[in-house]
Image (cartoon, rainbow, N blue to C red):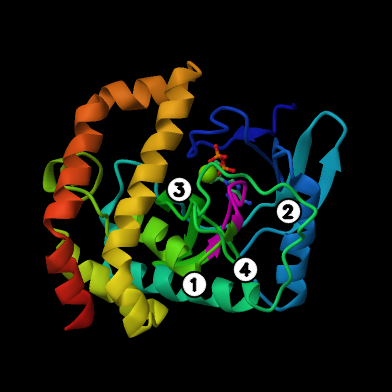
Amino acid sequence: MTAEDEALTGGMVNAGAVFRRGELVDRPAPPNARALHAYLLALKRQGFDGAPTPVSLTADGREQLTFLPGDVALPPFPAWAMTSTALKSVGSLLRRLHETNATLAIDSAAEWPRDLADPEGGTMLCHNDVCPDNVVFRDGRAAALIDFDFAAPGRPLWDIAMTARYWVPMLDPASAAALYPLGLVTAARLRTLADAYGLSAEDRAELPAVIEQATEVCRAFVARRVTDGDPVYLKALAERGGWARWDRIQTWLTDHRETFEAALLA
Ligand SMILES: Nc1ncnc2c1ncn2[C@@H]1O[C@H](COP(=O)(O)OP(=O)(O)O)[C@@H](O)[C@H]1O
Ligand SMILES: [Mg+2]
């Protein structure tokens, strides 16, 4: 590290370990970094410009990727990141990523992480962690996705469910108020995201249930981190209201399933 290195804050998994070094980002390499770099290079070859380009992998277990200029929203999320235009741009960026992913074969020899993966599996690589701190904005619109560490095979619908959790957000009003601007109308925003992505009627009918499934997977992820004594996750869980918050979110999702189905299909 030199004096020019700038610590990049935002994520939780690699908190304190991500640095900007001029045009590059230097961060801990995930275990499957080789396969992930090959995938990111394939995205670039296919003309997808909304992801970092991998540059190197070092012997000390770190990786270097291109730094993507722009704005990244960090919690509590600012109003500019939660406009309807922003939401639409996230939906269309995810669609572009998926269209490119659909043209690529998944490296079946690689061990894709199960942490946030679709339990039902799939034939396409999902990003799985499209939260605000993993999206770079330019001029109020989502321009790129970063942090592909949790990418794994899954259904496209799974990635949309994960994205909806963070960007609509799919949280009960009290949980949303703690991290998001006030006044976001859940059902309408879910519909906006589905429209911007171009979600099929079949997938719309399934989306609310898949969001519930994705919420369970995220809860289990946090539970594993907490059991392992991860200080970042212990602190976040305590500050945000413990397991009672997760119970509340899950009850709220089930209670409103029909409202969301109706908004998606109307
Ligand atoms: N390639 C990149 N271009 C621009 N900003 C980046 C890039 N990689 C990381 N960042 C910034 O650093 C923050 C943390 O990096 P990230 O790799 O997402 O860490 P974590 O794995 O902990 O989530 C991001 O939220 C973003 O603000
Ligand atoms: Mg991140």
Q: Which residue is mark 3?
A: 133
Q: Nearer the viewer, mark 4 or mark 3?
A: 4
Q: Earlier in the sequence, mark 2 or mark 4?
A: 2
Q: Earlier in the sequence, mark 4 or mark 3?
A: 4
Amino acid carrying label 2: it is: Leu
Horizontally, residue 36 falls left or right of residue 181, namely: right
At label 3, counting other C-alpha atoms closer than 10 Å, the crowd grade (few under 14, some 14-19, many 20 or more) is many
Q: Nearer the viewer, residue 88 or 170?
A: 170
Disc 2 and disc 4 in contact, CB within 8 angstroms: no
- Disc 2 to disc 1, how far (Cα)? 19 Å
- Could you tell me residue 70's position as x and y percent? 52, 58
Ligand 1 found in image quarter: top right
Element marked by disc 3? helix
Residue reaching furthest to the right: 59
Vertical comparison of 211 with 133: above or below: below
Amino acid carrying label 3: it is: Asp
Q: Earlier in the sequence, mark 1 or mark 4?
A: 1
Vertical comparison of 159 with 1: above or below: below
Q: Nearer the viewer, residue 207 or 19?
A: 207
Q: Which residue is mark 1?
A: 93
- Disc 2 to disc 4, how far (Cα)? 16 Å
Element marked by disc 4? loop
Q: Nearer the viewer, mark 1 or mark 4?
A: 4
Horizontally, residue 9 falls left or right of residue 87, namely: right
Vertical comparison of 201 with 48: above or below: below
At label 2, counting other C-alpha atoms closer than 10 Å, the crowd grade (few under 14, some 14-19, many 20 or more) is many
Q: Earlier in the sequence, mark 3 or mark 2?
A: 2
Q: Earlier in the sequence, mark 3 or mark 1?
A: 1
Q: Which residue is mark 2?
A: 36
Q: Which residue is mark 4?
A: 123
Which residues are the magenta region?
144-152
- Could you tell me residue 40's position as x and y percent? 72, 61
